[in-house]
Amino acid sequence: LLNTVWGMVAPSLLMTPFALFFLRQFFLNIPRDVEEAAMLDGAGKIRIFWRVVLPMAQGPLITIALITVVWAWKDYLWPLLIGRDESVRTVTV
């Protein structure tokens, strides 16, 4: 994976399983009563997701976004180690 873009992207892909696990645990803990109350009010599955569940998930979504940004921010050294060829190095601002 030396001198390839995939070598630089691979560590970032490790964040995806963590985010999935984190959000899965949150969605499993949403009370079923909330969804049932929305169904009784006439909401369908998509409306329940967009109007009820997604607003409840703002905290975990912001947490995942911040953790991902911090994870990516510290990734300055990795491209220097992997991308020895100038054609695959990233531009640092």
Image: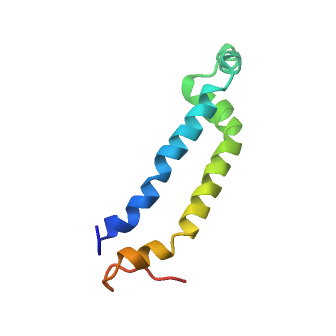
What count of labels does the image hold? 0
| Relative to 85, residue 15 above or below | above
In the rendering, at what x and y percent does residue 71 appear?
56, 62
The part of the image, by quadrant, that contains residue 60 is top right
Image point (42%, 75%), residue name? 79
Q: Residue furthest front?
A: 81
Q: Residue furthest bottom?
A: 86
Q: Nearer the viewer, residue 46 or 18?
A: 18
| Relative to 20, residue 43 above or below | above
In the rendering, at what x and y percent does residue 80 appear?
42, 79
Q: Nearer the viewer, residue 41 or 53?
A: 53
**Residue 73 as seen in the image, left or right of residue 33:** left
Image point (54%, 65%), residue name? 72
In the rendering, at what x and y percent does residue 90 appear?
42, 79
In the rendering, at what x and y percent does residue 26 appear?
63, 33
| Relative to 11, residue 63 above or below | above
Q: Quadrant of the C terminus?
A: bottom right
**Residue 10 as seen in the image, left or right of residue 1:** right
Q: Nearer the viewer, residue 6 or 52?
A: 6
The part of the image, by quadrant, that contains residue 70 is bottom right
Q: Quadrant of the N terminus?
A: bottom left
Image point (34%, 66%), residue name? 7
